[in-house]
Amino acid sequence: MREALIRRDLVAILRAHRYAPTPFASGSDFLDAARFISPGTAVLDMDLPDMTGLTVLQELLFKRRDIPVVMTSARADIRAAVQTIKRGADDFLEQPVNEADLLATIENSQSLLKNRIIVQKEKMESESILGKLSSREMDVLKELALYGDNSRAASNLNLSVRSVETYRCRIMRKCGAAKFFDVVTMYQRVFA
């Protein structure tokens, strides 16, 4: 009940200031919709009914990079706020949320949004390109991205160095890359 009242109040404040919030009753509802919602700032409670806000934050950061996150909590201390920021939140507000602080924080997060939209687009393009690779090619790419050494990749995957070199050429061709570094960059965009 308390969560619903807080959510209602936040939505009313944001709508009064010409924002178009989309409220969610649980972390799982938000994560289910995360693939489809437009880029924007998420105001996320640490204490959700079905999971922790930190769990939602971690899953969101894996799926989307174009949604700045402002965490809130009624029971947080400085240590919890610092941990939240270290785990990827962009800001932290204590509940009850002050209207002026909320609006200023959301306005500040808008400056992050443009760059993050570009980052998310690059991630999605890289996912699409890497989706052309076989599972074995992805294994080779992972090893080469981690260690950068054909011999070590060959040893770790029980392949010959020549086989790794062949996979490397095939991966570059499938990804349309002139340099293997470009493929590693795609890999890092998706898995970093």
Image (tube, rainbow, N blue to C red):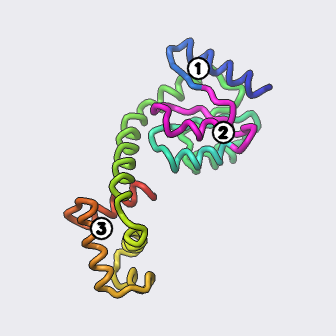
Q: Position of residue 152 (x, y in %)?
A: 39, 83
Q: Residues within 10 Å of mark 3 (few under 14, many from 20)?
A: many
Q: Is residue 70 left or right of residue 182?
A: right
Highlighted magenta segment, given as a residue range:
23-52
* Camera-nearest residue between 65 and 80: 65
The answer to which of marks 2 and 3 sits earlier in the sequence is 2
| Closer to viewer: mark 1 or mark 2 | 2
Residue 100 numbered mark, or none:
1
Q: Residues within 10 Å of mark 2 (few under 14, many from 20)?
A: many
Marks counted in the figure total 3
Can you say whether 15 is above or below 124 in the image?
A: above
- SS for tag 3? helix
Residue 171 numbered mark, or none:
3
* Camera-nearest residue between 1 and 138: 138
Which residue was labeled with disc 2?
27
Query: What's the residue at 36%, 43% (across, down)?
Result: 121
Amino acid type of the residue that numbered disc 1 sits on in the rendered structure: Ala
Quarter of the image where the C terminus is located: bottom left
Most common secondary structure along the magenta stretch? loop
